[in-house]
Image (spheres, grey):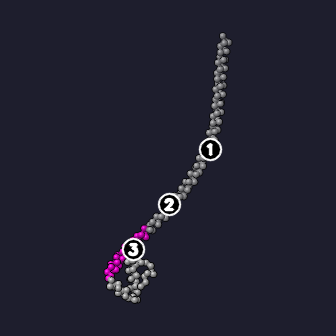
Amino acid sequence: MLLGQKRGKITDQIERLEIGLQTMKDTVEKVSALQELLKVKMEDVAVEIGKTNELMAVVGRESEDAAREADAAGVQEAETTELTNAAKAEKAACDEELSEAIPAMERATEAVNCLEVKIIQDLKALANPPWQCAEVTKAVLILLKGEKKPANHTW
């Protein structure tokens, strides 16, 4: 009986040791599989790190390009603003000159409208009119007909 009890205890201990050994073998196999998987994952991570570094380099270059373009746009905006202001000043000066010229043109138009046919016929009858008459006639020709070619301004 004592021998039977001791054998039972030893058999239980052997079974526990075999189960423990089997568990350790299973664990070693799982650890080996996980190590292989880890190696593969680490290679994937290394590839992804490389891609990320390349992408960061591209983003860095594009950021630098964007900053240069923004600087160029700022310079161009300043130039455009300067040109716009100059154009506005020129327009204001032209508008002022035009506002002074319009009344003179209206007076000249009224003066031309008061001419009669008889006066024009008398002027045509002159073979060699005074130079002042020729200049006035050229001005009237320009105003009425829009004739701007000097060749057509002869008497």
Question: Which image quarter: residue 93?
Answer: bottom left
Label 1 packing within 10 angstroms: few (<14), some (14-19), many (20+): few
Distance between the alpha carbons at the discs numbered 1 and 2: 40 Å
Q: Is residue 128 magenta?
A: no
Q: Is residue 95 magenta?
A: yes
| Mark positioned earlier in the residue sequence (2 or 3) | 2
Q: Is residue 118 left or right of residue 45?
A: left
Residue 63 image point, x, y percent = 55, 54
Range of magenta residues: 88-116
The residue where tag 1 is placed is: 47
Residue 85 image point, x, y percent = 44, 66
Residue 141 image point, x, y percent = 39, 80
Question: 145 or 93, which is in the foreground?
Answer: 145
Distance between the alpha carbons at the discs numbered 2 and 3: 34 Å
The residue where tag 2 is placed is: 74
Query: Mark 1: which amino acid?
Result: Val
Question: 146 or 136, which is in the foreground?
Answer: 146
User: Which numbered tag is attached to residue 127?
Assistant: none
Where disc 3 sits, the SS reads helix
* 107, above or below 72, in the image: below
Q: Which residue sits at x=36%, y=74%? A: 102
